[in-house]
């Protein structure tokens, strides 16, 4: 699965179960940006694809890490979903 495919599925997941800050979130959601990407890849601890996708999307949006960007005060679910959908 490519970064783009993971990001698009993660964006859809956030629409379905909600978005959060301050933690990855449980398997049932809501999730942060990284948590949604991890859910898409089924939480495979050795699968770096989820991390790569989330960090690619965040870096493209703001030249920062996924965790820092997701947890920025004032960040919205819509911004996170848009960043995931714009993931290269």
Image (cartoon, helix red, strand yellow):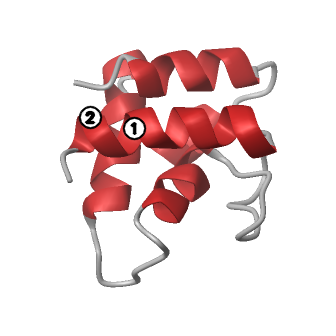
Q: CA distance from mark 2 to mark 1?
A: 5 Å
Q: Secondary structure at mark 1?
A: helix
How far across and down, in percent of the image, does residue 15 sit? 70, 31
Marker disc for residue 7: 1
Marker disc for residue 37: none
Residue ID for mark 2: 4
Does the rendering let one see residue 20? no
Is 37 displayed left or right of 51 in the figure? right
The vertical placement of 54 against 49, above or below, is above
Give the quadrant of the C terminus. Answer: top left
Q: Secondary structure at mark 2?
A: helix
Residue under the image location 42 percent in, 31 percent down: 58
How far across and down, in percent of the image, does residue 72 sit? 70, 30
The vertical placement of 41 against 10, above or below, is below
Residue under the image location 70 percent in, 70 percent down: 27
Q: Nearer the viewer, residue 65 or 5?
A: 5
How far across and down, in percent of the image, does residue 50 sit? 37, 58
Q: Are marks 2 and 1 in contact (CB under 8 Å)?
A: yes
């Amino acid at each position: 699965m490519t970064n783009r495919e993971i990001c698009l599925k993660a964006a859809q997941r956030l629409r379905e179960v909600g978005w959060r800050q301050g933690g990855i979130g449980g398997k049932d959601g809501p999730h942060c940006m990284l948590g949604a990407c991890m859910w898409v890849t089924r939480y495979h601890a050795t699968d770096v694809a989820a991390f790569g996708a989330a960090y690619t999307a965040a870096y493209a949006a703001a030249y920062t890490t996924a965790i820092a960007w997701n947890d920025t005060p004032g960040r919205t679910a819509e911004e996170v979903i848009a960043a995931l959908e714009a993931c290269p």
